[in-house]
Image: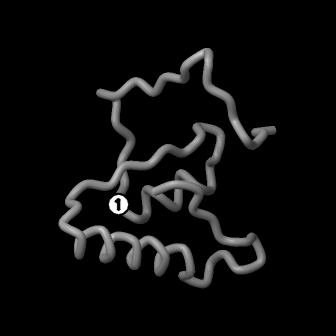
Protein backbone atom coordinates (compact mmCIF):
# COMPACT_ATOMS: atom_id res chain seq x y z
CA UNK A 1 0.00 0.00 0.00
CA UNK A 2 1.25 3.46 -0.78
CA UNK A 3 0.28 6.85 0.67
CA UNK A 4 -2.64 5.75 2.78
CA UNK A 5 -3.94 8.47 5.07
CA UNK A 6 -7.06 9.82 6.73
CA UNK A 7 -7.44 13.55 7.42
CA UNK A 8 -6.83 14.18 11.11
CA UNK A 9 -10.35 15.50 11.73
CA UNK A 10 -11.83 12.19 10.50
CA UNK A 11 -9.51 9.80 12.35
CA UNK A 12 -10.90 7.43 14.96
CA UNK A 13 -14.10 6.78 12.98
CA UNK A 14 -13.04 3.53 11.33
CA UNK A 15 -12.33 5.09 7.93
CA UNK A 16 -8.72 3.92 7.80
CA UNK A 17 -9.70 0.39 8.77
CA UNK A 18 -12.42 0.42 6.10
CA UNK A 19 -9.92 1.60 3.47
CA UNK A 20 -7.47 -1.13 4.44
CA UNK A 21 -10.20 -3.79 4.39
CA UNK A 22 -11.37 -2.66 0.95
CA UNK A 23 -7.80 -2.67 -0.38
CA UNK A 24 -7.14 -6.13 1.09
CA UNK A 25 -10.33 -7.47 -0.48
CA UNK A 26 -9.52 -5.94 -3.88
CA UNK A 27 -6.03 -7.46 -3.81
CA UNK A 28 -7.39 -10.83 -2.75
CA UNK A 29 -9.95 -10.68 -5.58
CA UNK A 30 -7.03 -10.21 -7.99
CA UNK A 31 -5.22 -13.24 -6.56
CA UNK A 32 -2.62 -11.19 -4.71
CA UNK A 33 -1.83 -12.90 -1.43
CA UNK A 34 0.82 -10.61 0.08
CA UNK A 35 0.72 -6.97 1.16
CA UNK A 36 3.72 -4.95 2.28
CA UNK A 37 4.01 -1.33 3.31
CA UNK A 38 6.57 1.18 4.49
CA UNK A 39 5.94 3.54 7.40
CA UNK A 40 8.45 6.03 8.72
CA UNK A 41 9.88 5.05 12.10
CA UNK A 42 8.92 8.38 13.70
CA UNK A 43 5.28 8.04 12.56
CA UNK A 44 4.07 6.71 15.91
CA UNK A 45 0.35 7.10 15.21
CA UNK A 46 0.64 5.49 11.80
CA UNK A 47 2.68 2.61 13.15
CA UNK A 48 0.14 2.02 15.95
CA UNK A 49 -2.60 1.95 13.30
CA UNK A 50 -0.77 -0.62 11.16
CA UNK A 51 -0.08 -2.80 14.18
CA UNK A 52 -3.81 -2.74 15.03
CA UNK A 53 -4.48 -3.83 11.44
CA UNK A 54 -2.25 -6.88 12.01
CA UNK A 55 0.88 -5.69 10.20
CA UNK A 56 4.12 -6.49 11.99
CA UNK A 57 7.63 -5.09 11.80
CA UNK A 58 10.07 -7.24 9.85
CA UNK A 59 13.69 -7.47 10.86
CA UNK A 60 14.73 -9.57 7.87
CA UNK A 61 14.46 -6.76 5.30
CA UNK A 62 16.74 -3.78 4.69
CA UNK A 63 15.16 -0.78 2.98
CA UNK A 64 17.59 1.15 0.78
CA UNK A 65 17.45 4.26 -1.38
CA UNK A 66 19.54 4.88 -4.46
CA UNK A 67 21.70 8.01 -4.36
CA UNK A 68 20.27 8.73 -7.83
CA UNK A 69 16.64 8.63 -6.68
CA UNK A 70 14.65 11.72 -5.81
CA UNK A 71 11.55 12.42 -3.82
CA UNK A 72 8.51 14.45 -4.81
CA UNK A 73 7.63 15.22 -1.20
CA UNK A 74 9.41 16.46 1.90
CA UNK A 75 9.44 14.79 5.28
CA UNK A 76 9.81 17.19 8.23
The relative height of residue 58 versus residue 46 in the rendered view (above or below) is above
Residue furthest out toward the bottom: 13
Residue furthest out toward the top: 67
The relative height of residue 56 versus residue 50 in the rendered view (above or below) is above
The residue under label 1 is: 54
For the N terminus, the quadrant is bottom left
Going by the image, does 10 lie left or right of 67? right
Picture coordinates of residue 6, whole percent (x, y): 65, 71
**Residue at the image position 81 percent from the left and 38 percent from the top:** 76
The relative height of residue 3 versus residue 12 in the rendered view (above or below) is above
Q: Nearer the viewer, residue 66 or 59?
A: 66
Q: Secondary structure at mark 1?
A: loop
Q: Residues within 10 Å of mark 1 (few under 14, many from 20)?
A: few
Q: Nearer the viewer, residue 67 or 57?
A: 67
The relative height of residue 29 versus residue 53 in the rendered view (above or below) is below
Picture coordinates of residue 58, whole percent (x, y): 34, 36
**Residue at the image position 40 percent from the left and 24 percent from the top:** 62
Picture coordinates of residue 32, whole percent (x, y): 23, 61
**Residue at the image position 35 percent from the left and 60 percent from the top:** 54
Picture coordinates of residue 36, whole percent (x, y): 37, 49
Q: How is the image coloured?
A: one colour
**Residue at the image position 62 percent from the left and 49 percent from the top:** 44
Count of numbered circles in the view: 1
Going by the image, does 35 lie left or right of 5? left
Q: Nearer the viewer, residue 61 or 33?
A: 33
Going by the image, does 66 lie left or right of 52? right
Q: In which quarter of the view is residue 31 placed?
A: bottom left
Amino acid sequence: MYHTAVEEAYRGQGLGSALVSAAEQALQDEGIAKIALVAFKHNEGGNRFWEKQGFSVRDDVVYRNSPKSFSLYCVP
